[in-house]
Image: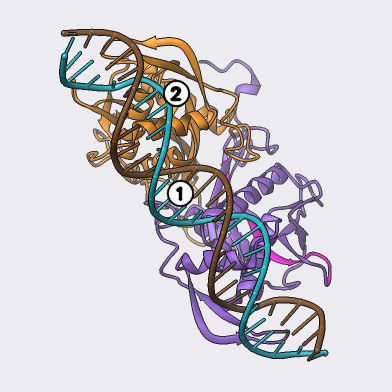
Chain colours: A purple, B orange, C brown, D cyan
Amino acid sequence: MTRTTVEDTPAVDATASDTTRVAVSTVIFALRPVEADGPLTVALPLVRRTRDPHEGQWALPGGWLDIRESLGSAASRTLAETTGLAPSYLEQLYAFGAVDRSPTRVVSIVYWALIRPDEIVEDGIENVGWFGAEGLPPLAFDHNEIVDYALWRLRNKVGYSRIAHGLLGDEFTLAELREVYQTILDRKLDPANFRRQVENSGTLIPTDRYRTGSHRPARLYRYNQDVELADRGPLSTPH
Amino acid sequence: MTRTTVEDTPAVDATASDTTRVAVSTVIFALRPVEADGPLTVALPLVRRTRDPHEGQWALPGGWLDIRESLGSAASRTLAETTGLAPSYLEQLYAFGAVDRSPTRVVSIVYWALIRPDEIVEDGIENVGWFGAEGLPPLAFDHNEIVDYALWRLRNKVGYSRIAHGLLGDEFTLAELREVYQTILDRKLDPANFRRQVENSGTLIPTDRYRTGSHRPARLYRYNQDVELADRGPLSTPH
DNA sequence: TCAAAAGTGTTCCGGGTACACCCATGT
DNA sequence: ACATGGGTGTACCCGGAACACTTTTGA
């Protein structure tokens, strides 16, 4: 193949026009009221873009992959830089690489994360806003589609694994844990059956403490860290 | 930040030393005897590397992502170029991006694929070899780890979805389908129960044809293409 | 004392498993 | 005829769903 026209000649300044760049973004889920004193909702933080493309629109927190960091590290770093958050759970979601998903060629490695209420930094950094995961406004790039996929994965994985504790503090009552499941799955769960199921799963450690306040005090539980294994298969360390 | 030493100055020739490149590789599974007249085994084709790094070692088929193609297209293309194969099933597996997984910085988007016996091109292209998925020799880069993960995903997904037909031809007997499951899962399955389970799943269409040859003829089945949906969630098109 | 949530007991149902049994064909 | 795999019937077990019931607190 020989170059015949100027269109075939790559720019001398090889910034973006002729290379594929790798970005890392993260969908961060938390459970919080989306309006003051409203019910708990699956919510996520978004960052307002301050430059083109899509200036002014909301987008997933993220940034460029540095040449000397792994993908998971890049997710953690860009997350902290843009939102100030450090999630308790972080897992790779998918690599998005459609040619037209950005004006320049960008492959985005997207992670998804869970954070506990006590890890949420309120109004930590400018240009960050929290949104309910359902009914988002139009986001930059293909980020609406990405959030939908992450939400599907969250709902799916809650069914067969015990990640829900990533949305709770260290100690919690069974009612609080059940509330997490009900919010994510968007349906009521029988308290009696729910109790037995999580108790039999072996992932809960009862403590001697109780949460008091209204009605009969409820026993507090803690999560058994030794479980969780045998979930992602032979892949132990994030890449 | 200001540049103070030569180490900080990027090379004018921006080939590989200061950029992250994106590669695409695929783990292709087929069911075939690994030695002539042996039992059916989960096997995959590997390509012998003809240049450094890891010259002479076996590696997953793959190549560089072209700037004008999506990730899935790149997987199909590099697959065809290196092995001559065109799989019936192709799905993204994981993005591998550890800093030290290659001498230069490479992020690999790995796909996994299934191919039917009739799609296998025997001795089609030089430098391609077939190996049993268990007990591979040491491969180039982190490819052993990648294959193990793909194998885990295959075994896992066979349990809850109906992808096994991606390893069979258009028409097949229940015994042949059961053989696929038994080979992948490495355990015997009850013929009676297996029949009822796949029949009740609604994914099989009985034909009027029978496979004769030994003993009582077995009815041939075809797969219902209309199913398979509601599996990868809202992600319909590969990116 | 009453409302409401915590916690227990019991029944029912459906799907998976084990296994006995009949059917149809090649040799 | 008989061995062998194709195909059917059935009993059992276990986990989830439904729901009645008792316990313990705050108000």
Q: Nearer the viewer, residue A127 or A151?
A: A151
The residue singled out by tag 2 in the image is B87
Q: Is residue A27 magenta?
A: yes
At x 71% / y 56%, what residue is drawn? A186
Residue D25: quarter of image: bottom right
Q: Is residue B58 left or right of residue B98?
A: left
Q: Decide which of A131, A66 is in the foreground and name it.
A: A131
Mark 1 surroundings: few (<14), some (14-19) or many (≥20) residues within 10 A? many
- Magenta portion: prevailing SS class: strand
Disc 2 crowd, CA 10 A, few/some/many (<14, 14-19, 20+): many
Say which amino acid is labelled 1: Gly
Residue B97's label in the rendered image is 1
Q: Which residues are magenta?
A: A21-36
Q: Is residue A79 left or right of residue B81?
A: right
Q: Residue at x 49, y 45 (%)?
A: B20
Q: Quadrant of the N terminus of chain B?
A: bottom right
Eye-nearest disc, 2 or 1: 2
Mark 2 and mark 1 in contact? Answer it, CB < 8 Å. no
**Where in the figure is residue B114, as x and y percent of width and height?**
42, 28
| In this picture, residue B39 sits left or right of residue C13 | left
- In front of the other: B214 or A30: B214
Q: What amino acid type should be assigned to the residue bearing mark 2?
A: Pro
* Pointer 2 chain: B
Labelled disc at residue A108: none
Q: Position of residue B134 (x, y in %)?
A: 26, 39
User: Relative to D24, is B111 above or below?
Assistant: above
Dot 1: chain letter: B
Residue B109 drawn at (x, y percent): 48, 40
Q: Secondary structure at mark 2?
A: loop
B12 above or below A36? above
